Image: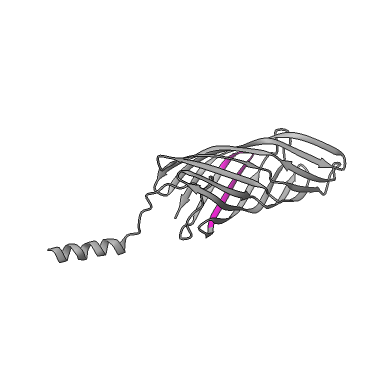
Amino acid sequence: MKKLTLVLSFFLFVSFPTIKSYGFTLLGGETLGVSENAFRVGAGFPNLYGAYHMPITDGFEVIPKFTFFYGADTTVPDVGDTFGMELKFRLIQSGGFALSLFADPAFIVAYHPNLSMGFRIGAPGVITSYCFKGKYYLIGGLKIPFGFLFYTKGPGKDFVAMIPIMFTLGGEFQLSNDFNFFFVMDMGPTIYAGSGGSATEFTPIVNIGFSYRF
């Protein structure tokens, strides 16, 4: 009987994948292990996006990301896409606290109301998180995703530098072993500087969504 129990235990061990019982965050300061991957989708104002998390080392992730946006700041009805990737390098993880350097470089193409193209350097940035009870994450950060836009058509044809100063606040909550729900806000002023002068606009970005680890 003891031999039969051992055989059945071995069969169950090799036949079924190990369930990850620990929590995780894709938006906070933690990074995934090298044996894990994940994706997340978000929607809100002024964009919706999809991102795929690929750990390179235990402390460094490369995250290809596609975004469709239908607004900029609170006054400009821009419509377009960004093609880029997030980069996350973990510096500190102690207890429930984690802190990472963050960058979000991307190519920008806007096709309404005027055609414009640009590149976002997406740095510097830092994101932090604190885990409660193993599955609730409070997220914060500061991002300054510097970038450039070139308007190719229209009366406002110009080369413009963008300097957003964005404060991040949000939460991520474990719904099951590998499935999270998140809510995150990035808000702050964006400084635009071109040959015609400079201006400052308030920029709100609010997203809710889901993430899945596998």
Q: Nearer the viewer, residue 119 or 23?
A: 23
Percent position of residue 8, x then y: 21, 63
Q: Quadrant of the N terminus?
A: bottom left
Tell me where residue 63 sits by quadrant. bottom right
Left or right, residue 91 beside residue 132: right
The range drawn in magenta is 43-54
Q: Name the colouring of the figure.
A: one colour
- Residue at image location 50% in from the left, 58% down from the top: 58
In the image, residue 34 sits, relative to residue 27, either above or below, namely below
Can residue 150 be seen here?
yes
Residue 153 falls left or right of residue 144:
right
Residue drawn at (50%, 48%) of the image? 93
Q: Is residue 204 left or right of residue 18?
A: right
User: Within the magenta stretch, is there residue 49?
Assistant: yes
Residue 205 shows up from this direction: no
Give the overall secondary structure of the magenta segment. Answer: strand
- Residue 112 on image: x %, y %: 74, 43
Q: Nearer the viewer, residue 72 or 23?
A: 23
Measuring from the top left, give residue 203's x and y in whole percent.
68, 36
Residue 159 on the magenta segment: no
Counting the numbered discs, the total is 0
**Quarter containing the C terminus:** bottom left
Residue that lies at the very extreme toward the left in this rendered image: 1
Q: Nearer the viewer, residue 174 or 138?
A: 138
On the image, which quarter does residue 205 sit in?
top right
Q: In this picture, is 34 found above or below 99?
A: below
Q: Can you give x and y, in whole percent of width and height, for residue 191 in the image?
A: 76, 38
- Judge left or right: residue 191 versus residue 195: left
